[in-house]
Amino acid sequence: RKEVEQDPGPFNVPEGATVAFNCTYSNSASQSFFWYRQDCRKEPKLLMSVYSSGNEDGRFTAQLNRASQYISLLIRDSKLSDSATYLCVVNDDAGGTSYGKLTFGQGTILTVHP
Amino acid sequence: NAGVTQTPKFQVLKTGQSMTLQCAQDMNHNSMYWYRQDPGMGLRLIYYSASEGTTDKGEVPNGYNVSRLNKREFSLRLESAAPSQTSVYFCASRVGQSLGYTFGSGTRLTVV
């Protein structure tokens, strides 16, 4: 079983649509969670952290369910510029003073069309 | 606002050649990482350095070596390149556990 699993898509949605991405992780000791965005032939960039209580940043809402080991990202009112690959990312529990390392899902491809 | 700088951006090697990928960050981050990204495989960790003076293997370390030269610099070396090492390589750094990575712009390596 992969440590972090995502539906690879692709998701093709019209402008203005609401789209949701899901992700599951296998390590119950994972402590930090993130969504990254990666544009074609570019480096991944942090979109948002995911907190236990859920959090929102403009049109983006992230949710975490620790009991089910499940993370989600909701994008409302999709824009053409939202077209990218979205990566679900989990921080392994390193213990001690180490920050551990991030494990990436394979990514979900989103295309928003006019 | 340099962030994480990787060099070179592109490289073509012949099988058996060696090279070093350079990475430097100017954000005073403790931890640095090298990943490779391949189609259908996602980002996989090669090596990381939790702090200056330490390095550890990641998921796919075979065929690579690293050096944490100082707090700013973390290099990745291919001693004898193989076609299977054709990939996009990303360096990243991080300041804290609750924070994500800052990535460099990547090195596109082709081994022929």
Image (tube, helix red, strand yellow):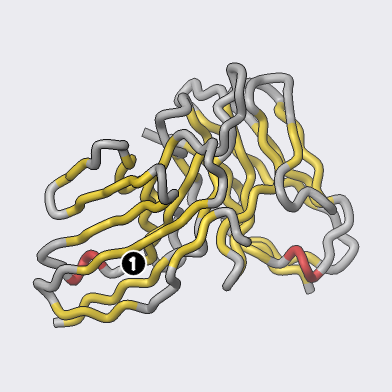
- Is label 1 in a helix, a strand or a loop? strand
Whether B105 is drawn above or below A97: the answer is below
Whether A12 is drawn above or below A32: the answer is below
Q: Residue at x 56, y 44 (%)?
A: A27
Q: Quadrant of residue B24?
A: top right
Camera-side residue of B112 and B48: B48
Q: Quadrant of residue B12?
A: bottom right
Camera-side residue of A95 and B63: A95
Q: How crowded is mark 1: few (under 14 residues within 10 Å), some or many (20 or more)?
A: some
Q: Which residue is drawn at 38% across and 71% down?
A: A109
> Residue B40: percent from the left, percent from the top?
58, 72
Q: What residue is pinned by disc 1?
A: A84
Furthest residue in direction front, as rendered: A67
Camera-side residue of A29 and B45: A29
Q: In this view, does A87 lie to the left or right of B5?
A: left
Q: Quadrant of the C terminus of chain B?
A: bottom right
Camera-side residue of B55 and B7: B55
Q: Type of residue at label 1?
A: Ala
Confirm whether residue A26 shows in the render. yes
Q: Mark 1 lies on which chain?
A: A
> Residue A84: percent from the left, percent from the top?
33, 67
> Residue B77: percent from the left, percent from the top?
78, 45
Q: Quadrant of the N terminus of chain B?
A: top left
Q: Which residue is drawn at 28% across and 48% down?
A: A63
Confirm whether residue B107 shows in the render. no
Q: In this view, does B64 lie to the left or right of B49?
A: right
Q: Which residue is drawn at 52% across and 34% down?
A: B93
Q: Is residue A25 left or right of residue A114?
A: right
Q: How many marks?
A: 1
Whether A61 is drawn above or below B13: the answer is above
